[in-house]
Image (cartoon, grey):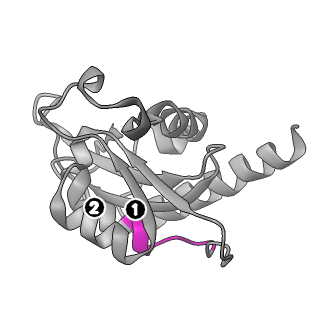
Amino acid sequence: MCLPAPLGGEKTGKNPTDRGKLGSKRHILVDGRGAPLAVVVSGAPAHDKTCAVQVLDSIVVPRPQTIYRVHHLCGDKAYDAADLRQAAAERQYQVHIGKRGIRVDEIPKEKHWLARRWVVERTLSWQNDFRSLRIRWAKNPDNWLAFIYLASALVLWQMAIKP
């Protein structure tokens, strides 16, 4: 999600969708419920697939180590890259990423796995309820990342108390 960063600082860049103003991105990995597991901050012009491996490496909570549990990684067509697929396979993920140039109705039903982007968008929306995350006012990216971690902890706490 690309957000404005009017004060600039490290890890900002010219936002291609906002008339070249400075902006930052939050790259987030969530579980099936929308609980945030990993966050990475980058400049606005950074493509999502270039930061995806960093997100996979920055998981805060270790995955459960069970024999029968299969960990799935869902992504939309923007993440269709051979190096990302290889990096996810090395980390024991079963990858479900759409292929660019292939329509959804051309894929057989047994291989069809829709990207659940709304789960990620909902988590980003929950984090946007915190005013300091909606617009990046922190010049230091580490301070902004600390705010994101705090918001993620509060989102997890809210998920725990609400059934």
What percent of the width, then of the height, locates residue 13?
Answer: 16, 51
Q: Looking at the image, which is closer to me, 140 or 117?
A: 117
Residue 80 part of the magenta segment? no
Q: Which numbered circle lies on residue 83?
A: none
Please tell me which residue is depicted at 54% across the width and 64% down the height of the picture.
146
Query: Is residue 10 visible from the viewing direction of this image?
Result: no
Residue carrying label 1: 40
The stretch in magenta equals 55-61
Distance in Å between CA atoms under marks 2 and 1: 8 Å
What percent of the width, then of the height, locates residue 106?
Answer: 23, 25
Up-down: is 64 above or below 104?
Answer: below
Up-down: is 44 above or below 121?
Answer: below
Query: Is residue 103 visible from the viewing direction of this image?
Result: yes
Residue carrying label 2: 51
The amino acid type, in three-letter code, at marker 1 is Val
Residue 60 part of the magenta segment? yes
Contact check, label 2 and label 1, Cβ < 8 Å: yes
Please tell me which residue is depicted at 22% across the width and 47% down the height of the picture.
44
In this picture, residue 139 sits left or right of residue 8: right
Q: Looking at the image, which is closer to me, 6 or 117?
A: 117
What percent of the width, then of the height, locates residue 101?
Answer: 11, 32
Please tell me which residue is depicted at 48% across the width and 35% down the height of the picture.
116
